[in-house]
């Protein structure tokens, strides 16, 4: 089976002892941020992180490619929850934007027509040593102004976070 970088990352995680009967779960925490007139981005799961299945998350939020701007989402994955303010890139940065996971892996979404891919699927092998492994995920969307060359990063908007527990 071909494993994505994220799946390989999950395989090499140092795991804590966990009950071999842990149930797969996804729990949302925190909140995202955006400009005051827009809803914050969201990360949602389409499936559960069960052994021998494919776990899929979706980004709902700013996501476009135009001649004058880009909104590129990136999936952040880490092994701990946190709350770190997003540093302002410009005066456009929305207030109260927090990283909710300390990312060990950042996966920028590839283009898909006039937008970026908005789902990420991660195969979970049928390996019982993964039961109870917990990761934390969040999407960040980088807004780039492309009215000049090269494009200039102007703000980062973030989604809520999710706690992902691999199980049965």
Image: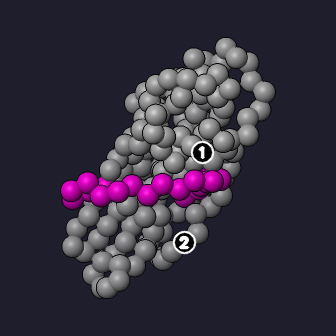
Write the residue at 55% across / 23% down: 126
Q: Is mark 2 in CB contact (under 8 Å) with mark 1?
A: no
**Horizontal relation, residue 23 to residue 72: left or right:** right
Mark 2, Cα crowd under 10 Å, few <14 / some 14-19 / many 20+, is: some
* Secondary element type, mark 1: helix
| The stretch drawn in magenta includes residue 106 | yes
- Relative depth, front residue between 69 and 78: 78
Residue 28, position as x, y percentages in the image: 54, 35
For image coordinates 48% across by 54% down, the residue present is 107
The residue shown at (27%, 81%) is: 147
User: Image quadrant for the C terminus?
Assistant: top right
Which stretch is magenta? 97-116
- As drawn, which residue projects farthest toward the top? 21
Q: Quarter of the image holding residue 27? A: top right
Above/below status of 115 relative to 2 = below
**Residue furthest out toward the bottom:** 149
Question: How far apart are the two marked residues, 2 and 1, measured between alpha carbons?
Answer: 29 Å
Vertically, is 90 above or below 137? below
Q: Which callout, 2 or 1, points to the residue nearer the camera?
A: 1
Confirm whether residue 21 shows in the render: yes
Residue 59 colored in magenta in the image: no
- Tag 1 or tag 2, which sits nearer the N-term? 1
Q: On the picture, is 20 further left or further right than 110? A: right
Task: List the residue tagged with mark 2.
Answer: 88
Where's residue 21, x and y in %?
67, 14
Which SS class for mark 2? loop
Disc 1: which residue:
9
Residue 54 falls in which quadrant of the image?
top left
């Amino acid at each position: 089976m071909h494993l994505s970088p994220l799946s390989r990352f999950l395989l090499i995680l140092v795991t804590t002892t966990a009950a071999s009967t842990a149930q797969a779960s996804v729990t949302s925490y925190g909140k995202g941020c955006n400009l005051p007139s827009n809803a914050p981005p969201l990360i949602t799961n389409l499936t559960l992180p069960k052994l021998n299945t494919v776990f899929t998350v979706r980004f709902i939020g700013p996501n476009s490619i135009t001649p004058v701007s880009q909104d590129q989402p990136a999936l952040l994955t880490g092994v701990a929850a946190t709350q770190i303010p997003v540093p302002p890139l410009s005066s456009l940065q929305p207030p109260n934007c927090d990283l909710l996971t300390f990312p060990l892996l950042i996966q920028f979404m590839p283009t898909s027509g006039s937008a970026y891919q908005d789902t990420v699927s991660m195969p979970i092998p049928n390996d019982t040593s993964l039961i109870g492994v917990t990761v934390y995920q969040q999407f960040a969307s980088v807004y780039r102004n492309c009215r000049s060359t090269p494009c200039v990063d102007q703000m980062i908007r973030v989604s809520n976070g999710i706690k992902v527990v691999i199980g049965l």
